[in-house]
Amino acid sequence: MNQQRYPRRGVYLLPNLFTTASLFAGFYSIVAGIHGHFRVAAVVIFIAMILDGLDGRVARMTGTQSAFGAEYDSLADVIAFGIAPSLLVFLWGLQHFGKFGWLGAFVFTACGALRLARFNSQAHNTSKRYFQGLPIPTAATVLASLVWFSQTEKFAWVGAIAPYLALGFVYLLGLLMVSNIRYRSFKDIDLHGRMPFALAISLVLIVAAVAVHPPLVLFTISVAYVLIGLLSTLWQLSQRRRRRR
């Protein structure tokens, strides 16, 4: 009697371990924020971002990419970079703004989820060199670094204006995530090949700057990334209008 054979079902362990670790970091950030440990919650979001970047790299290097891994990664990103940072800024400073505060936190979370859904639906049709819309990990980095920056004793004066900045950021970052503005993905960089010596020196300087004052440098880099993508897109649109005229 012939037995019908079914394909073996399973998931790749290694990349999904990094995704699970990123999800755990996002969940831990939520717990820390609820207990008022805002600095810890902000730092853990950065750890989640590092783990989120590693799972895709590991999957591509080991040839273990799968549709399950992509969907699982997006679900983990909603928790780690959508709910966790929005809840963090709400508990830290936005709750004093009433409806505008919790509505801004929701807008950030909803736009992040829409951004991920659009990315998954267009993953095979878009260029890997650029993202369409601001990536949700970068948006989460802006909020987390702002909270972390405001918690430092050397810059205590930032704590007075930081909640107002966060209120504007949650709406602005949410709109940028669902916009058509292009942001460089850096996925086309070959880590196995040679790189220019100037680029290697720049990376060393960036790492050294982060080591000197992590929250200030990370906040500056993340905001600069947001502004560069926005300004470059506006410049390209102006050039197209001039050509049409």
Image (tube, rainbow, N blue to C red):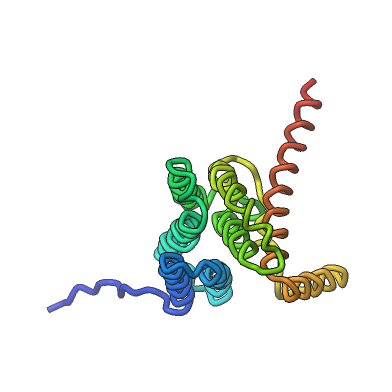
How many marks overall?
Answer: 0
* Residue nearest the viewer, comparing 23 with 17: 23
The reply, left or right, for residue 152 in relation to residue 66 is right
**Residue situated furthest left in the rendering:** 1
**Residue situated furthest top in the rendering:** 245
The reply, left or right, for residue 11 in relation to residue 6 is right
Residue 56 horizontal/vertical position (percent):
54, 68
Residue 101 horizontal/vertical position (percent):
47, 46
Point 73% across, 33% down: residue: 237
**Residue situated furthest right in the rendering:** 198
Point 43% across, 47% down: residue: 102
Classify 156 as above or below 232: below
Residue 205 horizontal/vertical position (percent):
81, 72
Classify 66 as above or below 95: below
The reply, left or right, for residue 63 in relation to residue 30 is right
The reply, left or right, for residue 10 in relation to residue 17 is left
The N terminus is located in which quarter? bottom left
Asked whether the viewer can see residue 133, the reply is no
* Residue nearest the viewer, comparing 56 with 133: 133
Classify 12 as above or below 241: below
Residue 134 horizontal/vertical position (percent):
60, 49
* Residue nearest the viewer, comparing 40 with 109: 40
* Residue nearest the viewer, comparing 238 with 11: 238
Point 54% across, 77% down: residue: 62
Point 80% across, 20% down: residue: 245
Asked whether the viewer can see residue 11, the reply is yes
